[in-house]
Amino acid sequence: DAFELRVRHPEATTLELSELGSVQHGVLATRIREREEGTYAFQVSRLDRENLRDFTATLTIVLGPGTAEERLITQEVVLSRTNLTATFSLAADGTLSRVP
């Protein structure tokens, strides 16, 4: 399955393509060294429209990695032939929500 991950930082106006990881291995990632105040956006997109079956991915976000406050957020993402993109908003308080 072909997919991509894009991220928008709080001060940015556009989503940037994440280039860490490997589609061949089913992993795409981004790393934010210091979290800025504000809301982040994460967008998972399905590139293949020909396949009839749904594409399922897991969006995993690690907040405060390696600290006593480390927290793992996971969100299953299902994309179909008609629903090719899912965008999520990560608020400053760590709340993840789907953007319509």
Image (cartoon, rainbow, N blue to C red):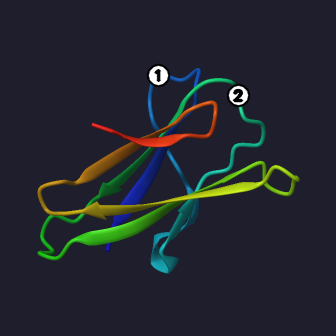
Q: Residue at x 81, y 49 (%)?
A: 69
Viewer-proximal residue among 60 and 11: 60
Classed neighbour count for the residue bearing mark 2: other residues with Cα under 10 Å, few (<14), some (14–19), many (≥20) = few
Q: Nearer the viewer, mark 2 or mark 1?
A: 2
Viewer-proximal residue among 67 and 79: 67
Q: Residue at x 68, y 50 (%)?
A: 31
Viewer-proximal residue among 17 and 58: 58
Q: Quadrant of the N terminus?
A: bottom left
Left or right of 52, for residue 39: right
Query: In which image quadrant can residue 56 be found?
Result: bottom left
Residue 40 vertical placement versus 96 (above, below): above
Q: Residue at x 55, y 40 (%)?
A: 95
Earlier residue among tags 2 and 1: 1
Residue 100 vertical placement versus 47 (above, below): above
Question: Which amino acid, mark 1?
Answer: Thr
Residue 16 vertical placement versus 22 (above, below): above
Question: Which amino acid, mark 2?
Answer: Glu
Residue 51 x %, y %: 15, 74
Residue 27 x %, y %: 53, 70
Residue with the mark numbered 1: 13
Residue with the mark numbered 2: 36
Residue at disc 2, secondary structure: loop
In the rendered picture of this protein, how many numbered marks are placed on residues?
A: 2
Residue 89 x %, y %: 46, 37
3D distance between C-alphas at marks 2 and 1: 14 Å
Residue 33 x %, y %: 77, 42
Q: Quadrant of the C terminus?
A: top left
